[in-house]
Amino acid sequence: MKLVVFTGAGISAESGLKTFRGEDGLWEGYNIQDVATPEAWHRNPELVQHFYNIRRKAVLEANPNPAHLALAKLEEKFEVTIITQNIDDLHERAGSTNVIHLHGLITKAQSSIDPQLTYDIVGHEIKMGEVCAKNSQLRPHVVWFGEAVPMMHEAVAQCKLADIFLIIGTSLQVYPAAGLIDYIPHQAHKFLIDPAADELNRNVNITNVAEKASSRVPKIVKQLLAI
């Protein structure tokens, strides 16, 4: 049985990581347009690099929470694919082995001229002057606003195969990722797990579970493993 999990910022927030943007349009005091666009990189690469170095340090200091750990256990019984909007590696550190990162992975660097060239980062910093094999400055392996989402095709393909679809900790408002629910088979069992689930979802084909991921996901996983 194929089980697809779609996670957003809410699951990582329960590990202490800040959600991408607040109501004021700022991220940790920074304007998103100044740190998360190709134009920002061309305008001030030092600022962008510094910003993601701070974020990376926070990711490395965070730990998977009970929701991450529970999802990894699903592999004992199901064919599991996790599709995440998050750029942290908490799913992998929890033990999940098949994770699609729609928006990249902050623990990796990529060439600023060839996104296919990626490298693991030692420590939490990419330094200005560090270059790829093509002698181009390394940048965060993160999909910025205005850039293509290269893993969408694979994510869509996995969604089409789902027998069970869990949506965890996402507002379903960030596109194109939010459009993945349109590819889930009609007969698949679908659940949205988020404290604001009742406000976020009006789709009668999706069961709302208005609860935090770290408290409810382990219970749902236990129920699924008992089937």
Image (cartoon, rainbow, N blue to C red):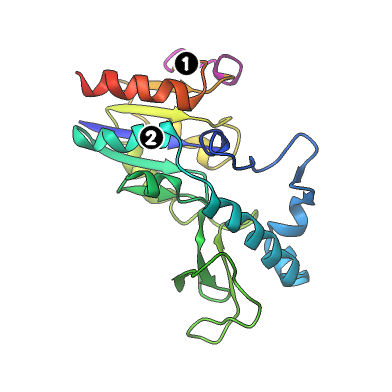
Q: Amino acid at mark 1?
A: Val
Say whether marks 1 and 2 touch (CB < 8 Å).
no
Viewed as shown, does residue 78 lie left or right of 185? left
Q: Main secondary structure of the magenta part?
A: loop
Rendered location of residue 126, percent (x, y) = 59, 71
On-image quarter of the N terminus: top left
Locate residue 27, reporting x and y percent. 73, 46
Residue 196 falls in image quadrant: top right
Which residue in the structure is indicated by mark 2? 5
Which residue lies at the image location 56% right of the left edge and 82% below the top edge?
131
Question: Is 149 on the left-hand or right-hand side of 126?
Answer: left
Identify the residue position indicated by label 1 in the image.
209
Which quadrant would the C terminus be assigned to in this image? top left
State the CA–CA distance, disc 1 to disc 2: 15 Å
Is residue 1 highlighted in magenta?
no
In the image: residue 17, left or right of residue 152: right
Task: Say which quarter of the image contains residue 72.
Answer: top left
